[in-house]
């Protein structure tokens, strides 16, 4: 059975993060809460760990997986190009529930991007997810903790029920909001496209005034 570590104090956070970092660095899978649902994190630069993640979720390999970074300063390491307006959008909505899709850097494995040469990136506003990102020197995946096609997990015990031994560690940070997933916004096209509307609404992006035109392809 997956190891479950309850985070309910500064000390438990410190110990839980230390163990999570070790597991992810060794190619393992860690479940953790985000501002929407529980996510599954592996080293996003490790193809073997990503393949194991696909197997655990029973996910089709032609579906890319988004990643979390801890700071907008890390963005140039993982993307081929940063449109100036996308950077402004990141400064406005990160940390938060906006995933922006960029042209990916060669440093990211093709198994992560499903060969599409694009990658979805965001900075999480959940304190535990953000702390985990900051504790690592690599980006981590943040795909929802669920078997593909099934509802995502809102609680740590649901992760245990779904994955049993498929996840190495579960950081139990309590019940997540679970209302909406992150919004996916593709900034590689002009005008940019909303591929999935979630936490950040289309009207919020438009009202920001950063983009003159936005295509809502939902």
Image (cartoon, rainbow, N blue to C red):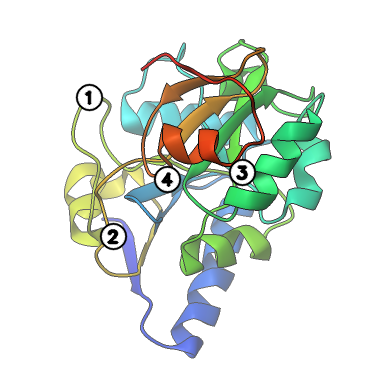
Q: Rounded to the nearest whole Å, what is the CA distance between mark 3 and mark 1? A: 23 Å
Q: Position of residue 79 (x, y in %)?
A: 76, 29
Q: Which residue is mark 3?
A: 43
Rendered residue at 80%/33% (across/down): 84
Q: Are marks 4 and 1 in contact (CB under 8 Å)?
A: no
Sequence-wise first label, 3 or 1: 3
Placement of the N terminus among the 4 image quadrants: bottom left
Seen from the viewer's position, the closer of residues 166 and 88 is 88
Residue at disc 4, secondary structure: strand
Placement of the C terminus among the 4 image quadrants: top left
Q: Are marks 1 and 2 in contact (CB under 8 Å)?
A: no
Query: Dot 4 surroundings within 10 Å: few (below 14), some, or many (20 or more)?
Result: many
Residue 202 position (above or below residue 92): above
Q: Are marks 4 and 3 in contact (CB under 8 Å)?
A: no
Residue 30 position (above or below residue 111): below
Query: Dot 1 surroundings within 10 Å: few (below 14), some, or many (20 or more)?
Result: few
Q: Which residue is mark 4?
A: 40
Sequence-wise first label, 4 or 1: 4
Sequence-wise first label, 3 or 2: 3
Left-right relation of 52 to 163: right
Q: Position of residue 133 (x, y in %)?
A: 61, 58
Q: Rounded to the nearest whole Å, what is the CA distance between mark 3 and mark 2? A: 23 Å
Q: Which residue is mark 1?
A: 149
Nearest to viewer (mark 3 / mark 2): 2
Q: Rounded to the nearest whole Å, what is the CA distance between mark 1 and mark 2? A: 19 Å
Query: Dot 2 surroundings within 10 Å: few (below 14), some, or many (20 or more)?
Result: some
Q: Rounded to the nearest whole Å, what is the CA distance between mark 4 and mark 1? A: 15 Å
Sequence-wise first label, 2 or 4: 4
Residue at disc 3, secondary structure: loop
């Amino acid at each position: 059975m997956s190891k479950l570590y309850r985070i309910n104090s500064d000390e438990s956070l410190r110990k839980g993060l230390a163990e999570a970092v070790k597991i992810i660095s060794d190619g393992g899978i860690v479940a953790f809460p985000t501002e929407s649902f529980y996510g599954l994190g592996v080293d996003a630069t490790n193809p073997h760990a990503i393949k194991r993640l696909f197997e655990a979720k029973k996910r089709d390999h032609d579906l890319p997986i988004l990643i979390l970074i801890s700071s907008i300063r890390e963005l140039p390491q993982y993307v081929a190009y940063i449109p100036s307006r996308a950077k402004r959008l990141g400064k406005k909505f990160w940390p938060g529930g906006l995933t922006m899709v960029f042209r990916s850097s060669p440093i990211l494995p093709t198994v992560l991007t499903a060969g599409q040469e694009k990658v979805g990136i965001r900075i999480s506003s959940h304190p535990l997810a953000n702390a985990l990102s900051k504790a690592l020197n690599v980006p981590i995946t943040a795909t929802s903790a669920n078997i593909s096609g099934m509802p995502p997990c809102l609680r740590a015990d649901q992760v245990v029920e779904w994955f049993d031994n498929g996840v190495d560690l579960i950081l139990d940070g309590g019940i997540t909001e679970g209302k909406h997933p992150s919004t996916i916004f593709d900034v590689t096209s002009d005008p940019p496209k909303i591929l999935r509307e979630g936490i950040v609404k289309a009207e919020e992006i438009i009202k920001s005034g950063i983009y003159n035109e936005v295509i809502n392809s939902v």
